Image (cartoon, rainbow, N blue to C red):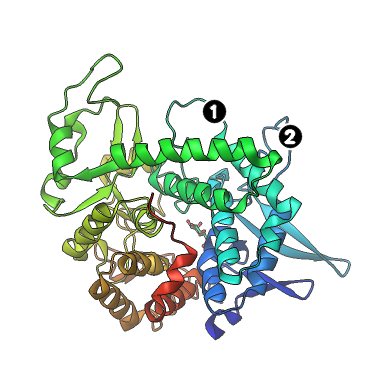
Amino acid sequence: MGKIGKSIIYYQGQPVGTFAANDPNMDALNYDQCFIRDFVPSALAFLMKGQSEIVRNFLKITLALQSHEPQMDAFKPGPGLMPASFKIESKDGKEYLTADFGEHAIARVPPVDSCLWWIILLRAYTKATGDLSLSHQTEFQEGIKLILDMCLAHRFAMYPTMLVPDGAFTIDRRMGVYEHPLEIQVLFYAALRAARELLLPNNDNCTCLEDVNQRLGTLTYHLREYYWIDLKRLNEIYRFEGDEFGAEVANRFNIYAESIPGWLMEWLPGKGGYLAGNLGPGRMDFRFFALGNLMAIITSLASEQESQMMINLIEQRWRDLIGEMPMKICFPALEGMEWKIITGCDRKNLPWSYHNGGNWPMLLWFLVGAALKTNRIEVVYRAIDIAETHISEDKWAEYYDGKNGRLIGRQARKYQTWTIASYLMAKELMSNPDRLELLTFERE
Ligand code: GLC
């Protein structure tokens, strides 16, 4: 944990989080802030090492930063949202916390994943320490409910999945990941499962708990049934009829067979499968997104058989998905006209770079966790071996570029905290696979 030591942020003398990166050779921008999603692997590594104080402090101060704004001012974050990041500022010898809900971030993206990770982390803290008193505090119960109010609100969709704008999670730039992106849906599922354990079964919470249960049923069904892609399913989609009218139709979302990308027909192995990147009216995003798929395995959203098929896919398409550094954030990259239209000509998200098909070592722990969950130990060793050949020599780079992730990302920061934390956590999980219980749920 010494490696993370230098990244720790203190507030009023207490450790409360970690900087996103500590690269002395690059402009800090907002990388000197503590991002909620980036802190997760550090938090889990701390919990696994029995150092829970920093996690407890983090959960408390982020709760205090949760938005309670009434919806009147549409330029302000809606109630329930948690910030993307926060920092400590000093004025007249006093320290203040300032939160960024995306107002300062590039393109003003709302971090929908933050509040979901917060609930998931609160449950991990509770499991690791056995300390129920934190989540049972009134403010914590209210905080959880405020998040659920926002996430469960019935708005413009008739799907159980959550409708979000583009770039509302790890991929926080325009990448065609608006509507119902997988990562958000899987985190939503995990947050609902966690909330069900954390909310006290009293009169105040009873309606909320009913809503959570109801939504979990429909959400799980929807994701398993309609996001799943394997050869059998691809064949069905390939032979779908379009424009079917009525309630009981096979092609519910009116996906046209012509929208199946050419690469997928050759690429999908017979014994492999994965969850699609997105599903909406007339649109199935066939790209493979690592975080959502791996978390679906870890949290038991995917069935045992599906989980095995997902790891088969990773094994059989190792060069594409793992390459020289585990692992690719999404596959394949958007290129040419597609890149222009979908990313809006984003120069940071050039094909095979950054979010657009770059390799991110912070994904190592998700991969190791998913491989341990499915008992595929050879994948664990292989992934850690590859990372170890150069992760520390490359000074814990943020991401890698190229089809196989051979080059350190052009604008990647060094000493990226979640790269370090993810590696530490992967090693910890390898020695103590039982610790994965902080993130897993019983299969239902
Ligand atoms: C970038 C990433 C985001 C991450 C942040 C801090 O904005 O896209 O996922 O949280 O950097 O590392």
For badge 1, the amino acid type reads His
Q: Position of residue 205 (x, y in %)?
A: 66, 41
Residue pointed to by mark 2:
70
The residue shown at (47%, 51%) is 190
* Placement of 324 over or under 336, stated as above or below: below
Q: Characterize the local packing of mark 2: few (<14), some (14-19) or many (20 or more) Cα atoms within 10 angstroms.
A: few
Q: Secondary structure at mark 2?
A: loop
Q: Nearer the viewer, mark 1 or mark 2?
A: 1
Q: Position of residue 354 (x, y in %)?
A: 39, 58
State if disc 2 and disc 1 touch (CB < 8 Å).
no
The residue shown at (53%, 40%) is 212
Residue pointed to by mark 1:
154
Q: Position of residue 119 (x, y in %)?
A: 58, 54
Which of 222 and 348 lies nearest the eye of the viewer?
A: 222
> Can you say which quadrant of the picture contains the N terminus?
bottom right
For badge 2, the amino acid type reads Pro
Closer to the chain start, of discs 1 and 2, is 2
* Placement of 259 over or under 327, stated as above or below: above
Asked if ligand 1 lies within 8 A of label 1, the reply is no
Q: Characterize the local packing of mark 1: few (<14), some (14-19) or many (20 or more) Cα atoms within 10 angstroms.
A: few
Which of 91 and 237 lies nearest the eye of the viewer?
A: 237
